[in-house]
Amino acid sequence: MNIKDIKKEFPIFDNKVHNNDLVYLDSANSSQKPKVVVDRIYDFYTKEFSNVGRSVHYLAVAATNLYENTRVLVQKYINAKDPNEIVFTKGATEAINLVANTFGQKYLKEGDEILITELEHHSNYVPWHYLRKSKGVKINFADVDENGDISIESIEKKITPKTKILAITHLSNVTGAILPIKEIIQLAHSKNIPVLVDGCQGAPHLKLDMQDLNCDFYAISCHKMYGPTGLGVLYAKKKWLEELPPYQGGGGMIGEVKKEGITFGDLPNKYEAGTMATAQVIAFGESINFINKLGIDKIEEHERELTKYGEEILRKNNSVKLIGSPKNKGSVLSFTLDGIHPHDIATILDEDGVAIRAGHHCCQILHEKLGLAATARASLGVYNTKDDLDQLNSSINKCIKIFNS
Amino acid sequence: MDLKDLYQQLILDHGKNPRNLGKFENFNKDAKGHNPLCGDKVHVYLKLDENKKISDIKFEGEGCAISMASASIMTELMKNKEEPEVKELIDDFLKMIKDSPELSSKIISEDEKTKLMSLSGVKKYPMRVKCATLPWHTLVSAMTDKPGEVNTEKED
């Protein structure tokens, strides 16, 4: 892969930040967008716009086809069995809320337990939290180890006869740990526990195969996959989507509406109430095409090599303390500098055009466990190069120099 | 933008070695402040004596250089100030950090003004203004016995 050519496909890199080239190391937060995706939104609105799934006129039919094409593209991309197992949501957060809400409503009762891990992003903890009050359920946390990893044993230890669902991240947005989710899913299923995987960080970086993983639910954030904001995907096994109640009510999700009662539509309409993020869905098709054109295997390989390089140079820098050294690490480099708060690091790096994130990265449970109020995080995407990481390292050195002057 | 304006020697010094850090026994007012976006935390303790004068003030906290330096400089300035003066200084500082080019208060010396103005570099960094103002909002809360924690996302 020629990264310089790939970078050219992202118009954002034509801009300067504080008169410097942009070194974008915040893709775990949100990735930049290739021109094809941006253009697709413009073209749709200027040439092809119509609402989908309702009217019978030319534009409506064409737009509906485009919308449904993305569903099939996503289905194939993650190797789901059926396109109706793909539900569009407003984000991965909504996808998890959908499951927590409907699964909780139908299957959970007082005393039941939900198992998550200490690695989870707030979006895979807070939606479950509501069930504590509404249903009286208990939330258990599998322990993260000193490497920032979650072992199968730590999951097994927290499973009880009352565990009704396991919700777990695929790839930690702080430690970069790639969890052995296939084995974890097998373990959970052997005890009849369904599994939701938070795939926000997994989907942009790892090859996915829903039929092989055999998870029950998988949540995807499209804006982290070179796609538009305001869009997520919930993959769910068909049997769950058929069994669970609808999440939101409104137009488009109904069968028949009468004064005495309402029936709900078939899949996937049952879960897509109201006018959906149509332009975003259609443009997300281009994100999938973009990834497919490069090949997710190639992207994985490139990012693995870069992560290794980043780890190497940062480990050589005695002032840097890397957070997490999991067995299998995704493209996330979280770190601290002795005596310098991550927000000061981020402000100083920004001056050089180096965009990183600082804070708790929506993982307060993990940061509390690590005994840190905040960390700095550099995260990678397909457009990053070794030069970007060298710049990161040299800006870190500048930061140390300012603070030690 | 110039990092040197933001990270002046004075700020770095107060950030690394905050003055009045800690807690003391006989405080009679205190308040906590929190910036949920970045995790900065501050807890201000003070003793307001019978003449409504701050006879002692300290703080506990963790956060970035800006928030620590701001709390450190604030506590230095507030010691031995009477309630109306405290109010005047808080208003003056918050006005300066938001839009006013300088401090207008006559109750502090030129040296003290210079010290306070060292925080003005933050104006060019809108995302960091809350770091500088958190201890001051927390002091307001302590002085007025406002219940609950100061939250930067709920203050101006």
Image (cartoon, grey):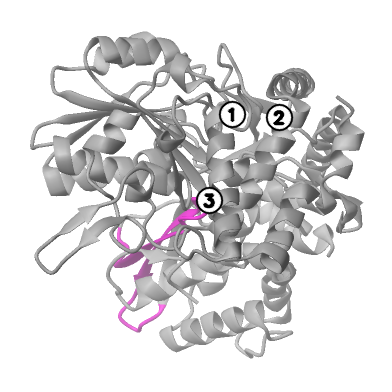
User: Which amino acid does the dot numbered 1 rest on?
Assistant: Tyr
- Which residue is label 3 attached to? A231
Q: Are marks 2 and 3 in one subunit?
A: yes
Residue drawn 30% across the image and 60% down it: B26
Chain letter, disc 1 residue: A
Residue drawn 60% across the image and 50% down it: A66
- On screen, residue A167 versus residue A286, left or right, reads left
| A220 in relation to A296, above or below | below
How far across and how far down the image is residue A73, in percent? 59, 36
Q: CA distance from mark 2 to mark 3?
A: 19 Å
In reply to whether residue A340 is colored magenta, the answer given is no
- Specify the segment rendered in magenta: B26-53
How far across and how far down the image is residue A183, in percent? 41, 10
Q: Quadrant of the N terminus of chain B?
A: bottom right
Q: Earlier in the sequence, mark 2 or mark 1?
A: 1
Label 1 SS: helix
Q: CA distance from mark 3 to mark 1?
A: 16 Å
Label 2 SS: helix
Q: Mark on residue A330?
A: none
- Which residue is label 2 attached to? A292
Q: Earlier in the sequence, mark 3 or mark 1?
A: 1
Q: Nearer the viewer, residue A142 or A49?
A: A49
Which quadrant of the structure image shows residue A289? top right
Q: Mark on residue A77?
A: 1
Decide: marks 2, 1 in contact (CB < 8 A)? yes
Q: Earlier in the sequence, mark 2 or mark 3?
A: 3
User: Which amino acid does the dot numbered 3 rest on?
Assistant: Leu
Q: Around disc 2, counting alpha carbons within 10 Å, would you say few (fewer than 14), some (14 to 19), or many (20 or more)?
A: some
Which quadrant of the structure image shows residue A329? top right
Q: Please identify, in this view, whether the residue under mark 2 or under mark 3 is nearer the observer.
A: 2
